[in-house]
Image: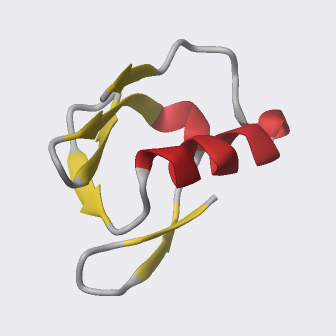
């Protein structure tokens, strides 16, 4: 799925690498390896993108903090 960094850069990530999605008030993606990234998309937009690419999602639980 494609996300946009705060600098406006487009990046492709695999939803299966996501551990947690936070909203504080920016949207922060936290990965299983401990890295994180602040993005422009809302938490709702990220969840919609995850649902749209189910073959990439391996069934791990993603935490969502609103």
Residue pictured at 21% horizontal, 32% vertical:
34
- Judge from the rendering whether residue 57 lies leftward or rightward of residue 47; answer left or right: right
Specify the color scheme: secondary structure
At which x and y percent is residue 25?
Answer: 17, 49
Number of callouts in the render? 0
At which x and y percent is residue 51?
Answer: 74, 38
- Judge from the rendering whether residue 36 lies leftward or rightward of residue 57; answer left or right: left
Residue pictured at 35% horizontal, 69% vertical:
40
- In this rendering, the answer to whether 54 lies above or below 27 is above
Residue found at the far left of this picture: 24
Q: Quadrant of the C terminus?
A: top left
Q: Which quadrant holds residue 45?
A: bottom right
Q: Foreground: 40 or 12?
A: 40
At which x and y percent is residue 10?
Answer: 47, 80
Residue found at the far bottom of this picture: 8
Residue pictured at 57% horizontal, 14% vertical:
60
- Judge from the rendering whether residue 44 lies leftward or rightward of residue 30; answer left or right: right
Residue pictured at 66% horizontal, 51% vertical:
49
- In this rendering, the answer to whether 59 lies above or below 25 is above
- In this rendering, the answer to whether 6 lies above or below 66 is below
Q: Quadrant of the N terminus?
A: bottom right
- In this rendering, the answer to whether 44 lies above or below 9 is above
């Amino acid at each position: 799925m494609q996300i946009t960094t705060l600098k406006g850069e487009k990046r492709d990530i695999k939803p299966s690498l996501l551990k947690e999605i936070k909203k504080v008030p920016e949207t922060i993606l936290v990965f299983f390896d401990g890295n994180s990234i602040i993005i422009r998309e809302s938490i709702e937009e990220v969840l919609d993108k995850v649902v749209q690419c189910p073959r990439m999602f391996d069934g791990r639980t993603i935490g969502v903090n609103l």
